[in-house]
Amino acid sequence: MSDPAISDPATSDPGTSDAAIRVLVCDDQALVRTGFVTIFNAQPDITVVGEAGDGRAAVELAERLRPDVVVMDVRMPLMDGIQATTRLAGAGATEPVKVLVVTTFNVDEYVYRALRAGASGFLLKDASPRQLIAAIRTVARGDALLAPEVTRQLIGRYAARIRPAKSEAGALRQLTPRERDVLRLVAAGMSNSEIAAALVVGSETVKTYVSRILAKLGLRDRVQAVVYAYRTGLVHPGDDPS
């Protein structure tokens, strides 16, 4: 008998497009998983390739199926979502997988731990189906998903714990003054359009700046950029981004 915590429907849908975003859903509540699967599979560009009911099964399936995005709950048996995210997307992962943490718990510490573990995004389960679908697409294309209000909340409570690292601060010299300005605004939780308005430039220009910043600093996404900005002392809790 197969493990009820593991489901692999990847080969059961002959109509699946090769171009579709492959998603692995990980949640210990069967009804929640069913809801996610229904929402995702209704989209022409998204397909669910597997389900897991605990963190250990999530890691096993993700390593085998190599999905584009793993939707990860936080509180799960055997191995929680934070541990599973670390295994799949943390610094020690040989082949990192993009993880979107979706949880009912709007707790700052969970946000902080999830991002430190390597998650590409954080979303609450009370998000609308449209927001959830948009989140999958955002993370799949390599962008980070962290609502500005969540970023600001995280910074307000936890940024003080992120001690500046002198070994990383030197890399900031690679950035131009304008790139530093953009990084400061990214760290403030501002979107590309908000940064564009603040700097009076186009959104595409901001997108180019962000891509250059990530490349120069060897960062994966905006979430890592936020943490980096605080670790290097470029910004501090309470700074006015304007």
Image (cartoon, helix red, strand yellow):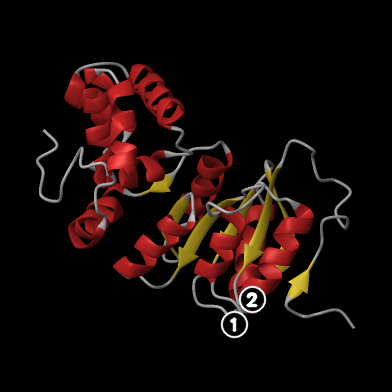
Residue 152 — which label? none
Q: Which of 27 and 224 is in front in this view?
A: 224
How crowded pointer 1 is (Cα within 10 Å; few <14, some 14-19, many 20+) is rated as some
Residue 52 seen anywhere in this rendered image of the structure: no
Q: Residue at x 33, y 47 (%)?
A: 227
Amino acid type at circle 2 is Asp
The x and y percentages for residue 118 are 49, 53
Say above or below: 202 vs 17.
above
Q: What element carries label 2?
A: loop
Residue at left 64%, top 54%? 40
Which residue is tagged 1? 77
Instruction: Please name whichever residue, 96 or 191, is drawn nearer the observer in this view of the structure.
Output: 96
Percent of width and height locating residue 219: 45, 37
Residue at left offset 41%, top offset 22%: 212
Count all numbered tags in the image, as a single digit.
Answer: 2
Q: In which quarter of the image is residue 41?
A: bottom right
Q: In which quarter of the image is the C terminus?
A: top left
Q: Alpha-carbon neighbours of circle 2 within 10 Å: few (<14), some, or many (≥20)?
A: many
Q: Circle 1 — which element?
A: loop
Q: Are marks 1 and 2 in contact (CB under 8 Å)?
A: yes
From the viewer's perspective, is residue 205 above or below residue 219? above
Name the residue that disc number 2 marks: 54
Of residue 222 and residue 128, the one placed in the foreground of this image is 222
The structure residue drawn at horizontal position 62% and vertical position 67%, both measured from the top left corner, is: 26
Place of residue 216 in the rendered image (x, y in percent of width and height, measured from the top left): 42, 25
Asked if residue 81 is positioned above or below residue 219 in the image, the reply reads: below
> Of the residues under marks 1 and 2, which one precedes in the sequence?
2
> The residue under label 1 is which amino acid type?
Pro
- Counting from the top left corner in percent of width and height, residue 142 is at 53, 37
- Position of the N terminus, as image quadrant, is bottom right
